[in-house]
Amino acid sequence: MQQLVELGAMIPQRWPVHAIDDWTEQLKSICGSFSPCRAECDVVTGSASIMDAGGVEVAQVANDLDVIRRDFVDIKRDYGENLFLLLQLEGTCGIEQRGRQSIIAPGDCILVDSSAPSIFHFGGNFSNHLSVHLPRQLIVAGKAAHVEISRRLEAEDPMSAMLRALVAKLIRTDAQDKRAQNLRELLFSATRQAFAMDEDPDHSFPADSAGGRLEIVQILIDRHLTDEHLTPQWLADKVGISLRTLQDDFLALGTTATSLIRLRRLHLVHEQLLQMKNGPSAPTIAEVAYSAGFNDISYFNRCFRKAFDCSPKDILQH
C-alpha cells in the first residue's frame, strides 16, 4: 500500500533496547499516564518518541510489552484532552475501550479516547504504530460529530487510506507552512467522517455500574456540550439515576459533573482559539465563549486563566 510506503521512514532497520522504566517515562512524557506491563523481563525493544507534523503532534510508539493500561487513576493523574488516531505500521495491537475489543494490523486505523479507560494488548510481540494527537473537543463536540470510538478501519478502507495519506503529508509539512492549517482542518474533517456513527446515538443506555455510567455520561457531555440544558440533573435523568448517585460516581474521577462540563467547554474554546491564530477573519473571543456554553464572560476569563495559566488573548497573540 502506497501510504505505508510513504511512512516507511517510520520503520527503522533496528530498534533500541530500553529498561522498561525508561521506556515508560518516554511514553508518559508524550502521551500521558499509562501503566505498561511485561511479565518475564525488565527491558523493552522499541521506543516512544514524538514529532511535529504540520502543527499536529504525532507520537511513535514501538514496543514488545505484554499490556499497556490507562485506568481512572491514570486519567485522574493527567486528564487527557486528545483523541489518539492510531495508524498501525508493524505487528498487531489489541485494544479495549468502551466495551469494544479490536485488533489492528499494518495499515489499519482506530480512534482511542484519552479521557476514557483503555487497555492495549501486545502479548510480548513487537508492535509499532503512530499515534496522532487530535484536539478531542473539536472532533467530538456537537450533534453533527458523532464519532465512534474504538472502531477499526481496515487498511483497504478508502477512508483509512485517506487518513494515512494526510498524516504522511503532514509529517512532511512544516508547521509554519501556509498550507499546514488547511491540512490540519482536512485531517480533522476526514477523521470525523471516517469514524462517523451510522445510527442515532441519543437513546437510553444501560447503566449497571459506576464505570459504565461514567462512560455514558461523558459521551452525553460531549454530544450536548454546548447545549443550555446540559446540567448534572439532566445527565442523571438521562442515565436513569439520582443526582446523588451521579455525584458519587464522579468521586472515582476526583471531580464533579459540573467541573467536567466546564473543563471540556474550556478545552473546546482553547482548541478553537488555537485554530484561529493563523486563520483569516474569525469570531471574537466572546463569541467563541458564548458558542461553547459560557454565559458570563468574566467568569469564563477567570476559569480559562486558571485552567491554562494564560488569558484567551495570550493564545491568539503567541
Image (cartoon, rainbow, N blue to C red):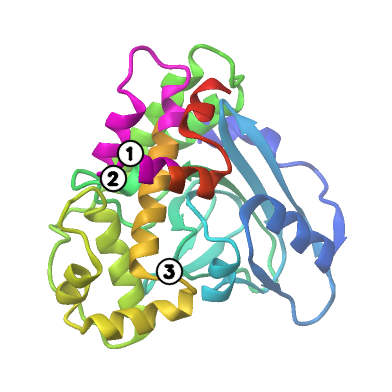
Residue 204 coordinates in the image, percent (x, y): 13, 73
- Tell me which numbered mark, 1 or 3, is placed earlier along the sequence: 3
Query: Does 107 sit left or right of 157 as displayed?
Result: right
**Where residue 11 sits in the image (x, y, percent)?**
70, 42
The residue depicted at 51 percent of the width and 11 percent of the height is 178
**Which residues make up the magenta segment?**
273-301
Q: Residue 297: which numbered mark, if any?
A: 1
Characterize the local packing of mark 3: few (<14), some (14-19) or many (20 or more) Cα atoms within 10 angstroms. Answer: many
Which residue is denoted by mark 2 in the rendering? 294
**Label 3's element?**
strand
State yes or no: residue 293 in magenta.
yes
Q: Amino acid at mark 1?
A: Ile
Q: Residues within 10 Å of mark 2 (few under 14, many from 20)?
A: many
Decide: marks 1, 2 in contact (CB < 8 A)?
A: yes
Instruction: Determine the image quadrant of residue 68.
Output: bottom right
Q: Which residue is mark 3?
A: 97
Q: Marks 1 and 2, Cα distance to the nearest angstrom?
A: 7 Å
**Mark 3 residue type:** Gln
| Mark whose residue sits in front, 1 or 2 | 1
